[in-house]
Amino acid sequence: MLKSEEGKLIILSGPSAVGKGTVITALMDEYQDISYSVSVTTRQPRVDEEDGVDYFFVSETEFKEMIDNDEFIEWAKVHENYYGTPKKCVEDTLASGQDVILEIDIQGAAQVKKSYQQGVFIFLAPPSLEELEARIQKRGTDSQKAIEVRMENATEEMERAENYDYIVVNDEVEEAVEKVKSVIIAERCKVD
Amino acid sequence: MLKSEEGKLIILSGPSAVGKGTVITALMDEYQDISYSVSVTTRQPRVDEEDGVDYFFVSETEFKEMIDNDEFIEWAKVHENYYGTPKKCVEDTLASGQDVILEIDIQGAAQVKKSYQQGVFIFLAPPSLEELEARIQKRGTDSQKAIEVRMENATEEMERAENYDYIVVNDEVEEAVEKVKSVIIAERCKVD
């Protein structure tokens, strides 16, 4: 009657600096019924990062083997490093009946969509592009040039929001978390 | 980008005694962004009932005029009395951007579906038919014969749950309220 007992794959994406990480961290704090998928990367761990918790850290050779063995739901090369979402972890968790959330950029989400049409695609949007720029400026980690590139990307990405199932505006984090949580609860009540 | 600014029409239905009224009362307590549609009836007001709050009380002649003027979203004759959902109230509220919730039986919901395909149809289900019967027994207002009729109807009605958009199981009222609330919030984030 209700959708199958399999967990749901939730994809949260949106432009850089919109607050995906913050929203997911807050969501997981108050909502234990969901797993966060740990990504695989070839980049070096930062001092506070733990293998298997923050990322699975692998060599480039291992990563490329995983690509060849079709072990990723999606992967990308960003600057010099590879990042990917491992298929097996996600599928095992879904099969056990638990939901999985992926924090993923818009290109990655498009890749996931190809093999997981039944995924729940949520676009996290800034209240406005001006507000997004203000957030990037405030973070203070980007040069003016880099900010311009980010903003150009964001403008393009915003146009792709309509390909998603849901749009959640991240104005106040608490409200955004409640909305994402509501989407997950509602999706579980949805009739197939 | 998001669905239009018009409010959403939420239809909550389910078998008799499943707890629709309790869920809606609790929902309205903690969630002010939604209006409850007051029905029109020809039955006599009970001592504690107020015209325009619990029902709009009208004469049978007035009710029949309203039917002729197509002023109802749905209406029904139950025993000797008429009950109906007035179209104008609902449409004015939706146009103002506020959501409206209708508590309605399954036949009524089917009528609403014909003219409001864009409505959000939620089926409130008991955890089991046994539990539903236990609740009716506990209420102590029905004869054994009446309980049997209710249970026959409920069995048939449960089969129609799949025509709804969402099924919410009313096991614990608090949880059911959270689920209905989540459906409403999620529907507001849905991409058209």
Image (spheres, coloured by chain):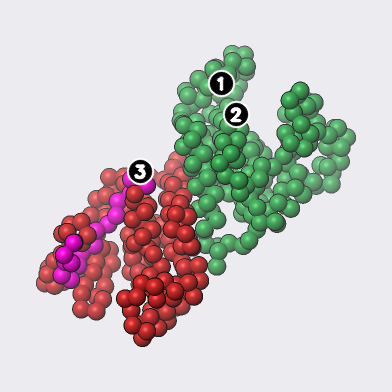
Chain colours: A green, B red
Q: Secondary structure at mark 1?
A: helix
- Marks 3/1 in contact by CB < 8 Å: the verdict is no
- Cα separation between marks 2 and 1: 9 Å
Please say whether residue B46 is one of the residues in the magenta stretch.
Answer: yes
- Which residue does the numbered mark 1 point to in the structure image? A136
Q: Are discs 2 and 1 less than 8 Å apart at CB?
A: yes
B34 within the magenta span: yes
| Residue, disc 3 | B5
Tag 3 subunit: B
What type is the residue that disc 2 sits on? Ser
Left or right, residue A128 beside residue A78: left
Say which residue label 2 marks. A16
| Residue name at image x 70 percent, y 56 percent | A96
Residue A122: x and y in percent read 55, 43
Which x, y percent locates residue B111? 33, 68
Residues marked 2 and 3 touching at CB (< 8 Å): no
State the residue at coordinates (62%, 14%).
Answer: A143
Label 2 crowd (10 A; few <14 / some 14-19 / many >=20)? some
Q: What is the chain identity of the residue bearing mark 1?
A: A
Determine the secondary structure under disc 2.
loop
Percent position (x, y) of residue B174?
Answer: 44, 54
Q: How many marks?
A: 3
Mark 2 and mark 1 lie on one chain; the one further toward the N terminus is 2
Give the distance between the C-alpha atoms of the residues marked 3 and 1, in whole angstroms: 30 Å
Q: Are the numbered discs 3 and 1 placed on the same chain, yes or no?
A: no
Q: Which quarter of the image is occupied by the C terminus of chain A?
A: bottom right
Give the residues drawn in magenta, as a range.
B30-48
- Characterize the local packing of mark 3: few (<14), some (14-19) or many (20 or more) Cα atoms within 10 angstroms: few
Mark in the foreground, 3 or 1: 1
Q: Is residue A110 visible?
A: no
Magenta highlight: main SS: loop
Residue A25 occupies quadrant: top right
